[in-house]
Image (cartoon, rainbow, N blue to C red):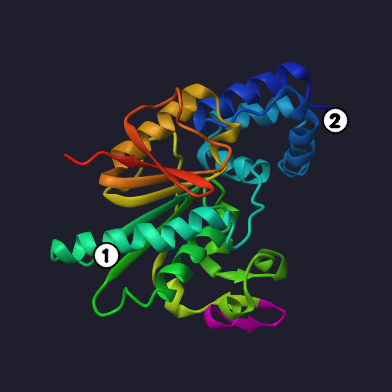
Amino acid sequence: MIYQFELYEKEFKLLQEYIHDRFGIRFKDEKRSFVQMKLFPRVMSLGFRSFGEYIQYVKYGSENDHELARMISLLTNTETYFFRELPQLNVFRDFLLPEFREKRIAGNEKKIKILSAGCSSGEEVYTLAMLTFDTGQFFWGWDIEIIGMDLNEKALETAQKGIYYDRSFRMTEPEYIEKFFAPNSGDYIAKACIRQMTTFIPGNITSPLPMRDFDIIFCRNVMIYFSEEKVKKAIHNFYEALRPGGYLLLGHSETLTGIFDEFETKRFPQTIIYQKSEP
């Protein structure tokens, strides 16, 4: 039996377009060798004779949804850490949480709902939980729901376990580690006080979101790999999923200028965020 394990240009083009159509992610031409390296072990393990056969299986096979999820897990970067991009986190803690607390108390409601879209292995979700808990303002009947959503099923498994190694804590103050994590045979596991605020679900931001009525959506450094068409689709989905007056926080290199003008821009020291208008 003859096996051909070079990812030829024609095959790569088919894969590029398929991934873009399904997920919005655009792999540049120079990423062909990276994609080949990442997928080669999977192609071998399934017994295919070429990348072309594997691509056909992903697109049309009887278990293509499962394999598509497996493939995207292999190709997407899950590198992240706690307390990433501090200026935005400071805005979240010092301005957004107090604002929503006042609004909810005035409306006789004690619920805040937050989405971390493209949450990877969960560090951002637990960071938001730590900051919320540490304010000391959301006990006594408050319902704080912080939902992490990602395409990468392996990353979501890590997030659900809540177990992390030293590398994830490289921007974390020691007191946060001591307060919110327990030593666990060489790594650390998130304590119940923050885990109980969190939920993790699979999802694709270029499709209508499976949940709505969010007060705050974080989607940072996810859409830098998207085409403009898919960015617009994702932003529209965020807009529809936010409550009036809700906020969208993007990565420091991402902007809505010239892409989507329904949000109001709010400027803070070292960062900007976007607010959905209230009626």
* In-image side of 20 versus 112 (left or right): right
Q: Which residue is mark 2?
A: 1
Question: For residue 232, which quarter of the picture?
Answer: top left
Secondary structure beneath label 1: helix
Q: Which residue is mark 1?
A: 101
Viewer-proximal residue among 193 and 186? 193
Viewer-proximal residue among 121 and 52? 121
Identified at 52% across, 30% down, the residue is 24
For the C terminus, the quadrant is: top left
Viewer-proximal residue among 210 and 5? 210
Give percent across and percent down for residue 132.
Answer: 41, 69
Give percent across and percent down for residue 236.
Answer: 36, 32
* In-image side of 175 versus 54 (left or right): left
Q: Are marks 2 and 1 in contact (CB under 8 Å)?
A: no
Asked whether the viewer can see residue 50, the reply is no
The question of residue 183 being in magenta is answered with: yes
Three-letter code, disc 2:
Met
The question of residue 158 being in magenta is answered with: no
Which label sits in the foreground, 2 or 1? 1
Asked whether the viewer can see residue 258, the reply is yes
Q: Earlier in the sequence, mark 2 or mark 1?
A: 2
Identified at 45% across, 79% down, the residue is 192
Q: Which mark is residue 7?
A: none
189 to 52, vertically: above or below? below
The segment highlighted magenta reads: 178-187
Three-letter code, disc 1:
Arg
Secondary structure beneath label 2: loop
153 to 226, vertically: above or below? below
Query: Which residue is the extreme one toward the right?
Result: 2
Give percent across and percent down for residue 47.
Answer: 74, 39
Identified at 66% across, 46% down, the residue is 77
Real-space Cα distance between discs 2 and 1?
66 Å
